[in-house]
Image: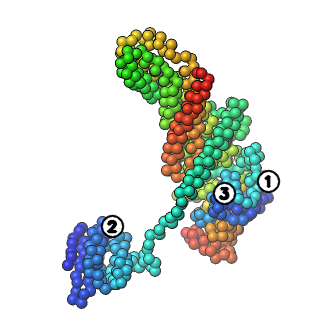
Amino acid sequence: MAGESIIQVENVTAAYDSEVILSQVSFEVYAGEVFVILGGSGCGKSTLLKHLIGLNRPAVGTIRIDGADVVGAERQERSEILRKFGVMYQSGALFGSMTLLENICLPLEEFTDLPPEAIRLVALMKLKQVGLAGFDNHLPAELSGGMQKRAAIARAMALDPRILFLDEPSAGLDPITSAELDELIVSLARNLKMTFVIVSHELASIFTIADRVIMLDKKVKGIVATGRPSDLRDHSDNPWVRQFFSRQAAPDG
Amino acid sequence: MASAAQNSTMLRADTAGDGSTRLSIVGRLDATTTGAVWRQAMQVLARVKTATVILDASGIEYCDGAGIALLIHLRTQQSADGGGLEIHGLHPEFQELLHDITDGETLAVSLPVEVETSFAEQIGKAVVELLQDIRTVISFVGELFLAMAHAARHPRRVRWRDTLKIAEALGVDALPIILLIGFLMGLIMAFQAAIPLGQFGAQIFVANLIGLAILRELGPLMTAIVLAGRSGSAFAAEIGTMKVREEIDALKTMGLEPVRFLVVPRVIAALVMTPLLTIFADLVGLMGGSVVLLSLGFPLITFFHQLQTAVTYGSPVGGIVKSFFFGILVAAIGCLRGLQTKNGASAVGESTTRAVVSAIVLIVITDGIFSVIYYYLWV
């Protein structure tokens, strides 16, 4: 797992107006690993993700992605940073008025000078990679939730970014679809050497996919545990963390 | 003493010789039957006011949340009056339910925290909000201007396919309603004016009135207001839904500026289509007026002749110039309100309303400004 460090978060404090959500959070993500941000509802997982992808600015602190400062970036620099990663939103956030193919072609049309037939080919490849070959002409609304999420991953991968951010990939999916999505993530991480940063609270999938997790807590407003999921379950000093991991762990545990 | 049957659930109340009251409930205590029992029980308790009430619950064959609520209420009511309630013979499973719910805590509605704001504070807040809104509008106008300038310099980067689609929905699809309203507007105005003017034998001047009113004001205004209702609201709803569904966030993190990507095509479409629609509205408005004059016995040639003497080129051209601005305004404010959408389904509705209201207010204000400008330009 241990490649070089690709994301560095230092002392980030996140706040909405005067309400502090996260205080002084620091961590690193290494290239090629599947990194999961974990925690109960309302602990600031999604807030942290929004900061990482530059939608929100931290009140204090720095975030560097692949050497570039996300927080202080100005227009031009910013759009270069955005090219380094793809994001899959919780709802998929595919553009409803476009077919799947058009959705995936969009970033390619906007940011490359590939000829149209090349763009189409790349988009079809991405769809095949996420197991949606043959659905290129469907509108997002015509697909199931799981398929929409996979299509959203395909769109996020369109420009072959080094990093993919996924917001709750398994939320609202049945166990089988959710497991398929997990397999997809693992295979992409292994075969394409992509780095994944995943926000989740589904313990079942975390044990399958995660190399490392950080666990956020509402009371601490920060990280209570960092490490491999199985280590946290078995050896954490924090009884609450052990409880969290074992209570909801796999049905056989 | 009191007994009643409703849906086969009965409440009996007996006062024993020692003054204690015995209530017994027989039947089902569920959401549909408890209401009647509840009211009777309250009446009984209010009447007897005895220290101890014994509730014989052995006849309760079923008890759901409403029934448990009744038991809890009876108990708190009694202890508030300084008495007590003994529940006898309640089935163990209901006993457990009652125990689980009342476990150590009293149930009370948490009162909303009311923060009193003084009148001055409210005014202050409203002013700050207004200023913030003006600020966002100004910065949005700036952003839009930059994006439009960028589009003019790099026309190939504009999303023309989207623009055409929007232009079709905004322009072509709006044509029937514009034609209908324009025609009727001309017809009605001419008809209303013909009556008083006829008293002075000046019916031919209906042509002057129609010509000036339609070409200068009503054609562009009415077109803009129909657009605000049809397309401004649609833009706000469309973009608002995209915001709620995180699609706007997705655009941003893909490095695509929502203003360039969503607003520019809409503004271009409105910019082109609004003047065209206005021309149609002008023409059918005049046709509506001519129908009235024809019915009054004036030949068409007289109408046109009169029109020519009354109307200079300034009137239609001034109206069409205005309509460019109206079009930009309707599209831009619709998009802005859409982008400002907060979270939730009701937020989209709110944005839509705000889009239409703001658009109409701004149209009227802009129209006023143009009236002043045209006055000084002698148009």
Residues at marks 2 and 1, CA–CA distance in whole angstroms: 63 Å
Q: As shown in the figure, which amino acid type bears the numbered disc 2? A: Ala
Locate residue B104, reporting x and y percent: 46, 80
| Residue in the image at 55% along x and 37% along y | B362
Q: As shown in the figure, which amino acid type bears the numbered disc 3? A: Leu
Q: As shown in the figure, which amino acid type bears the numbered disc 1? A: Gly
Task: For marks 2 and 1, give the one nearer the viewer.
Answer: 2
Quadrant hosting residue B285:
top left
Q: Could you tell me which quadrant the N terminus of chain A lies in?
A: bottom right
Q: Which residue is mark 3?
A: A49
Locate residue A201, reporting x and y percent: 60, 63
Locate residue B183, reporting x and y percent: 43, 23
Q: Which residue is mark 2?
A: B31
Quadrant hosting residue B14:
bottom left
Q: Residue furthest front?
A: B200
Quick one: B89 or A165, which is closer to the camera? Answer: B89
Q: Which residue is mark 1?
A: A67
Kind of element beneath mark 3: helix
| Residue in the image at 52% along x and 44% along y | B354
Quick one: A190 or B316, which is closer to the camera? Answer: B316
Callouts 3 and 2 on one subunit: no
